[in-house]
Amino acid sequence: MLEEYRYYQFFKPAGCITALRDEKEPTIMQYLGALDMTRLRPVGRLDRDTEGLLILTDDGGYNQRMTHPDAGIEKEYFFCALGVFDQEKQKYLADGARLRGVQEVTARPAYVQVLERSSLKQIEPLIKGKTRERVLKNRPDTPAFSGLITVTEGRKHEVKRLLKSIGCCCVCLKRVRMGEVRLFPDLKPGEFRGFTPDDR
C-alpha cells in the first residue's frame, strides 16, 4: 500500500523566516498552527523579506527532487527593481551572470520578462518591511521596472544578486511558481491549502 503523503501551498508573507523555530526571528509557524507540523517540512527556503509560494510536505523524495540543484527545477518570481533594464542586460543574465561573494561564481542562465517600466513612486506600495525604510530614501522619480524572472539554481539571495550584477536593486520579490506548481491566485499572505503535485 502506497504511503499517503501531504502537500500544501503556503503563501509566505514578508517579515518571517523559513524555519519551524527561532529564538530571535518570527517564523512561518505563526501562520501554520492549524497544521500538524510533526513531519511536514518546507521545500526550499524564502528570504525573510521575500513572499509567495512555499511548498510544505512530508514526502522526502519529492522535497529532494524539487530542491536538488542537478534537477534544474524552474523557480519563477515576480519582482520590482530600481534601475534600467535593456537588451544587453537581458543577454548578460541569459548567458550566465558573474555573482560576487566570498567566491565569484557564474550563475546558471536566468530569464527576465519585463512587465512594466515605472518609477520608485509607482512601485512604492509593493515594497515592504525593512527594505521599504531603506529604499524610500531614494528620489521618487528613480527609474524602476517590474517583471518575472526564472532561475533554476537556488543559490542564496540568487535573484537579488543577479539583479545587482547588472546594476539594479531588487526591492520586492514574490515566488509565484516552483516547477509545475503555481501559487493559487486566490491564496492570500499567511494562508495555506492542500494540493496534489503532478510529478509524485
Image: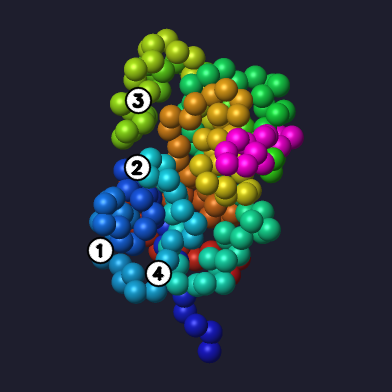
Along the viewing direction, whichever of 26 and 147 lies nearer the viewer? 26
Cα gap from disc 1 to disc 4, whole angstroms: 12 Å
The number of discs equals 4
Q: Is residue 156 above or below residue 42?
A: above
x, y percent for residue 138: 38, 15
Categorize mark 2 by other alpha carbons within 10 Å: few (<14), some (14-19), many (20+): many
Q: Which residue is mark 4?
A: 40
x, y percent for residue 113: 61, 31
Q: Is the image coloured rainbow, by chain, by secondary structure, or in one colour?
A: rainbow
Q: Which residue is mark 1?
A: 33
Where does the magenta region start and end?
94-105
Cα gap from disc 2 to disc 1, whole angstroms: 18 Å
Looking at numbered disc 2 in the image, what kind of residue is underneath it?
A: Ala
Q: Which mark is residue 14?
A: 2
Looking at numbered disc 3 in the image, what kind of residue is underneath it?
A: Arg
Q: Secondary structure at mark 1?
A: loop
Answer with mark 2 or mark 1, whichever residue precedes in sequence: 2
Q: Which residue is mark 3?
A: 134
Is 190 included in the stretch rendered in magenta?
Answer: no
Q: Is residue 188 above or below residue 55?
A: above
Answer with mark 2 or mark 4, whichever residue precedes in sequence: 2
Answer with mark 3 or mark 1, whichever residue precedes in sequence: 1
Q: Secondary structure at mark 2?
A: loop
Q: Secondary structure at mark 3?
A: helix
